[in-house]
Amino acid sequence: MDISEIIDQELTAVEFVTDYLQLRFEGPLLTLYVWPYVLTTEFSVAFGEPEYRNALCAQIGETVAKASLEEGVALTIEFSSGVALGISLREEDLDGPEAGSYSSTGSVGDEVEF
């Protein structure tokens, strides 16, 4: 699956739902059923650790510099600030059959799961 269309787009919202996360860009929507790690220039933080939500929300307004989704391997998003988000897509690291979904239009109707 190609998520490269989020490159050069601004992260406009980070939405925490009960057991998943939604990242909204200028058009596309990325829904993650696996909590991503956040790697900043100073530290890395994972779900449940202090400052996790702050580190994610601090990326609102940042522009995506790189984005890749290698099915069965990893999802990585790097912002122009140098901060990166990522999740492992290896089967042994997932709790369910899907790690997330992607909609190029931001509509739930055209989501493609990965």
Image (cartoon, helix red, strand yellow):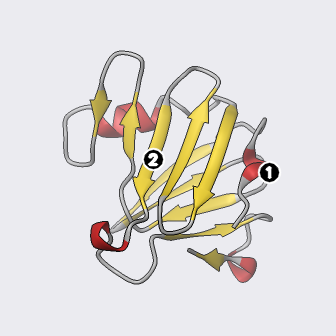
Mark 1 to mark 2 CA distance (whole Å)? 17 Å
Vertical placement of residue 56 versus 36, above or below: above
Count of numbered labels shown in the rendering: 2
Q: Residue 22, percent across and down? A: 52, 58
Taking the spot 36% from the left edge, 74% from the top edge, the residue there is 91
Disc 1, SS: helix
Of labels 1 and 2, earlier in sequence is 1
Q: Looking at the image, which is closer to me, 33 or 39?
A: 39
Local crowd size for mark 2, using a 10 Å CA cut-off: few (<14), some (14–19), many (≥20) = some
Mark number, residue 5:
1
Label 1–label 2 contact, CB within 8 A: no
Vertical placement of residue 45 versus 69, above or below: above
Locate residue 46 relative to residue 72 in the image: left or right.
left
Taking the spot 37% from the left edge, 63% from the top edge, the residue there is 34
Q: Looking at the image, which is closer to me, 90 or 36?
A: 90
Image quadrant where one finds the N terminus: bottom right
Q: Residue 66, percent across and down? A: 67, 37
Image quadrant where one finds the C terminus: bottom right
Vertical placement of residue 113 versus 34, above or below: below
Local crowd size for mark 1, using a 10 Å CA cut-off: few (<14), some (14–19), many (≥20) = some
Seen as rendered, the residue at the extreme top is 42
Taking the spot 45% from the left edge, 70% from the top edge, the residue there is 99
As shown in the figure, which amino acid type bears the numbered disc 2?
Gly
As shown in the figure, which amino acid type bears the numbered disc 1?
Glu
Q: Quadrant of residue 55?
A: top left
Taking the spot 30% from the left edge, 22% from the top edge, the residue there is 43
Q: Residue 24, percent across and down? A: 64, 52
Disc 2, SS: strand
Vertical placement of residue 97 versus 11, above or below: below
Locate residue 12 relative to residue 84 in the image: left or right.
right
Identify the residue under disc 2: 86
